Amino acid sequence: MSLLTVDGATQWFRNQTKPALDNVHLQIAPGEIVALVGESGCGKSTLGRISCGMLEPTTGSVTFDGHAVTSMSKRELKRFRMRAQMVHQDPFASLNPGLPLRTTLGYPLRYHRLARSRDLQDHLLALLESVGLDEGPAFLDRYPHQLSGGQRQRVSIARALSLNPSLIVADEAVSMLDVSMRVSLLDLMLSLQEEHGMAYLFVSHDLGVVRYFAGEGRIMVMFYGLVVEEGRTEDVITNPQHPYTTVLLGGTPVPDPRRARQRARGDSLKQAEGAASDTGCVFYQRCPLARQRCLEAQPPLLDVGSQHRSACWFHDEVPAHNQATNTTIAGTPAG
Amino acid sequence: MTARPGTSATAGADTQLPAPTIAVDHLSVDFLLPTGRLRAVDDVSFEVNEGELFAIVGESGCGKSTLAAALQFLVPSPGRIATGDVLLRDQSLSAMNDEQLRRLRAADVAMVLQAAMGSFNPVITIGRQVEHVLEAHPQVWPSRRDGVAYFDHLLEIVRLPPARTRRSFESQLSGGMRQRVAIAFGLLLKPRVVVLDEPTTALDVVNQGIIIDVLLDLQEQLGVTVVFVTHDLALVAELASHVGVMYAGRMVQVATVDEIFYSPRRHPYVQALLSSIPNVLQAGRHARPIPGSVPRLDQLGPGCRFAPRCPLVQDRCRHSDPPLAGDASGNRVACHPLNDEITAEVSKP
């Protein structure tokens, strides 16, 4: 049974002519990693917020652990919000600057009665240690501005982890960090998953990070409120079945200057400009494969392989992403 | 497919003939804090030649943004330039008075900040702000109409519709568009050098790609020299022709982009950074974090600052700080074991 099911979610925001999410389906099994990818404004964060109960979709249903969220009692709702936690993008904005870590981290534990006042400190120290911040009790009296970006994001993860969630929604959780810090945070989140077995809904625009983090999981590619491709991570990245996925893959910078020089310039603009189409396929205006049939209606998400679905009539014409890679980059040791 | 600028310079190393566009000469920047003096940039020297795309790379707190600000002699208080100089085509910035520096900052070395927030006045249109800039610097564009026409030309290069963009307020532009407008602003007074601080941070992959293309086009069409600051080596691979890598206030390697990515003679820190990138072309858990953490600037020892995290560390690395030593091809590295290799090579023939 799936842990979370979002069924046919459509989300309208005020004064908008198109929905932010348009009839989106999402299932996450216990312990599974699902990555949502797409550019700014594609609805991936909206879906993330719906998945952890921060937002109720305009239409459509959300089911967590077999219970529909809309029909939950107050107590069940409280429990749902405890078990579905969120890690935000910006660790500057997501930690209250006026509160020491002791208060920020202690409040949820007290609210949900997971720790008593007298053993709160031990609990918090153990928690910080589990996210790699074993700096002693004085650390609990620090304020967010006294921490580095990486430390702050570890505190955010600790806060989410403290309530033993079965789902963590990580919304661009590493994109504000230095590249050199990202891997250690991703490794931390993966090792916590091995230990506690929670599921992740991982929202990111960076396919390099997604392939690393959700290598064993699934990817859903979103474009203007619609899921245009979904499948197992390796399938989607090595054998994309929607032209938008190839655009995202082609735009992901790689640490290989020779390869970068071969990239045709100008493509980024052709493929990036132009909003969603109003009639027919949402990707029509930007699509290199677009033709008459695409103007008729939005293609549905159809099976194109094992657990692999695409919303493109011409998915078998989508070029494979060039995987040829220069192994001298990360392969050779220094000196 | 178009050849990338800077690649020809990559092939030949003899760039000695013309004076470098910017030469940073033993520059140190101090921050005077109540707790004492912090040296954020420590004895940094490098040169940027005309038409290069020079990347200053490093992690948060390594001094890269301070160094970028120092290229305009504009270090935010309580910082001050302690020693050294910046030379713009042999003109010394330390010898300039305030008025000369003001002109230099506008029309010779322009700065484009991390533009997503706060670079624009939110209550007047982009067009009005262009006029304000032109009013303040009549020496560059005596005719305001010509100035506006040039701004329109720049907007076309950055792929924005000129008339509509000038009528817009900041709030009507997306993050990626704002960054492109900020770049056009930076080039309005025809600077020789434009310095960009984290030009793609906070943008998504699609907008990052546009900024990369736009900067390559501008460099090619206007011949402007570009210096940019970033923490992202993948961006460096896409955009830079030359690279300076900073670690804890020191420049640890200055080289062409190919030497950084393909030469075995790279600083162990650069190697560690490269190994830490999650690469979309590789499956599995291939990336490795850098062990340990960046040293605090107020707790530096006498030796190499990377020594506590370095896989090549030797005894002497803990006692003496290695200088930047260059090999025959112009690649300069500050690392004792690598410097020995270079010395052996130079003395061989």
Image (cartoon, coloured by chain):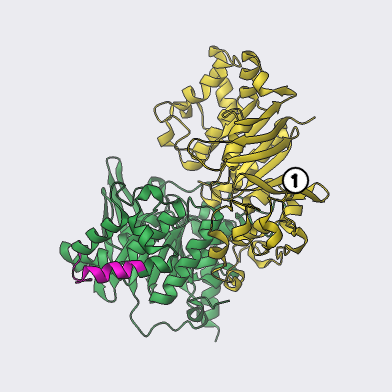
Chain colours: A yellow, B green
Please give the range of residues in magenta.
B136-152
Among the 4 quarters of the image, the one containing residue A333: bottom right
Q: Would residue B217 appear left or right of A211 to someone viewing this image?
A: left
Residue at 44% over, 58% down: B199
Q: Is residue A268 above or below residue B10?
A: above
The residue that mark 1 highlights is A216
**Place of residue A66 in the rendered image (x, y in percent of width and height, measured from the top left):** 75, 24
**Place of residue B175 in the rendered image (x, y in percent of width and height, measured from the top left):** 45, 51
Q: Is residue B233 above or below residue A25?
A: below
Question: Residue B148 in magenta?
Answer: yes
Q: Chain letter of disc 1? A: A
Q: Is residue A2 above or below residue A148?
A: above
- Residue B263 visible: no
Viewer-proximal residue among A90 and A327: A90
Label 1 SS: loop
Residue at 28% over, 71% down: B87
Can you say which quadrant of the picture contains the C terminus of chain B? bottom right
Q: Would residue B169 appear left or right of B271 to someone viewing this image?
A: left
Can you say which quadrant of the picture contains the N terminus of chain B? bottom right
**Place of residue A42 in the rendered image (x, y in percent of width and height, measured from the top left):** 58, 46
Viewer-proximal residue among A260 and B79: A260
**Place of residue A209 in the rendered image (x, y in percent of width and height, measured from the top left):** 62, 50
Q: What amino acid is labelled 1 in the image? A: Glu
